[in-house]
Image: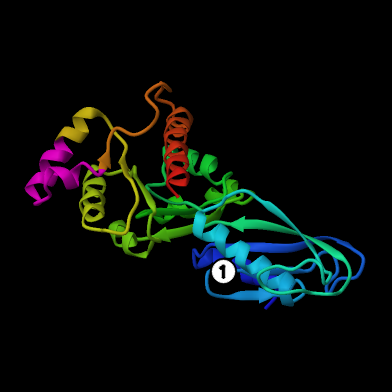
Amino acid sequence: MHWTAVVERLRQDREAAVLVTVADVRGHAPREAGAKMVVAVDRTWGSVGGGNLEETAVARARAMLAGGVATTEQLTLGLTDKARTEHGRQCCGGEVTLLLEPLPVVPSVAIFGVGHVGLELARILVRHDLELHLVDSRAAQLTDERLACLDDGAGAVRVHHSPVPEVVLGAVPAGTHVLVMTHDHAEDFAICDAALRCRHLGSVGLIGSAAKWVRFRSGLLVEGHDEATIGRIRSPIGDPAIVGKEPATIAVSVAADLLRVFAAERARV
């Protein structure tokens, strides 16, 4: 399998890896500059030259994965009988510089309700390297024409039309951050109730006023959720320093708050 296909498959499977590239070759070496290998926790694809060179690269790549290293590294190895590593010697006579690029699992976000605010929020988030799930009970909100503004983004967009949107919660990846902002408060409540019964989700945020949250909190208690469980939901959502009622302003506020959540997650790795 070509390395580009491997990277795409790992991304879809939400499995972290490291891309190892022969960046520079001086003298004799088993592979030319540009040769690539993908290293996951328990598998590799491709080759940067075998032997000591490759074993050293694999060991360092897996140490990066274990340590959650997010920055690119360079590794220079001499291929002579005097350049011994824990994996032995390789006597080609040259020197090789490898570039090790982490391929982390990207954040996943599910927006329930792709109305004016939801679409503006999607337009911001899709500019980032993440997996974006758009969920709505109204097919008209999810047409190709309406979502065309997302086509040139860096994120991977997954569209879910569901008359019962809360069922999509079971299909999103572990750790997905859920944002509830549908056109219908009853629908919002059903999604919040279902989200609290899911153990695989990340944060859960509900758009709306403090008064709306008071009503929802009371209803969730009636549904049998305890205070600690209800506390998983953040409402209102967004950065309180960003004030305004226009959809684009609300979207910026929510996105800014969510980006801080991403940063905190990276810091915990």
Image position of 36 (left or right of 265) = right
Colouring used for the render: rainbow
Image label count = 1
Asked if 142 appears above or below 87 in the picture, the reply is above
At horizontal 63% and vertical 68% (from top left) the residue drawn is 58
Read off the magenta span.
215-232
Residue extending furthest front? 82
Q: Residue extending furthest right? A: 27
Q: Which residue is mark 1?
A: 40
Residue 51 point in image, percent of width and height: 73, 77
Which corner quadrant of the image does residue 29 belong to? bottom right
Q: Nearer the viewer, residue 120 or 178?
A: 178
Secondary structure of the magenta portion, mostly?
Answer: helix
Nearest the eye: 121 or 25: 25
Quarter holding the N terminus is: bottom right
As helix, strand or loop, the secondary structure at mark 1 comes to loop
Give the x, y percent position of residue 25: 87, 62
Q: Residue 258: percent from the left, percent from the top?
A: 43, 39
Residue 116 vs residue 70, the one in the foreground = 70
x and y percent of residue 128 in the render? 57, 45
> Is 132 inside the magenta-drawn segment?
no
229 within the magenta span: yes
Q: Is residue 220 visible?
A: yes
User: Which quadrant of the view contains residue 61?
Assistant: bottom right
Query: Is residue 173 found left or right of 199 in the rendered image?
Result: right
Q: Which amino acid type is marked by label 1?
A: Ala
Crowd tier of the residue under label 1, counting other residues whose Cα lies within 10 Å: few below 14, some 14–19, many 20 or above? some
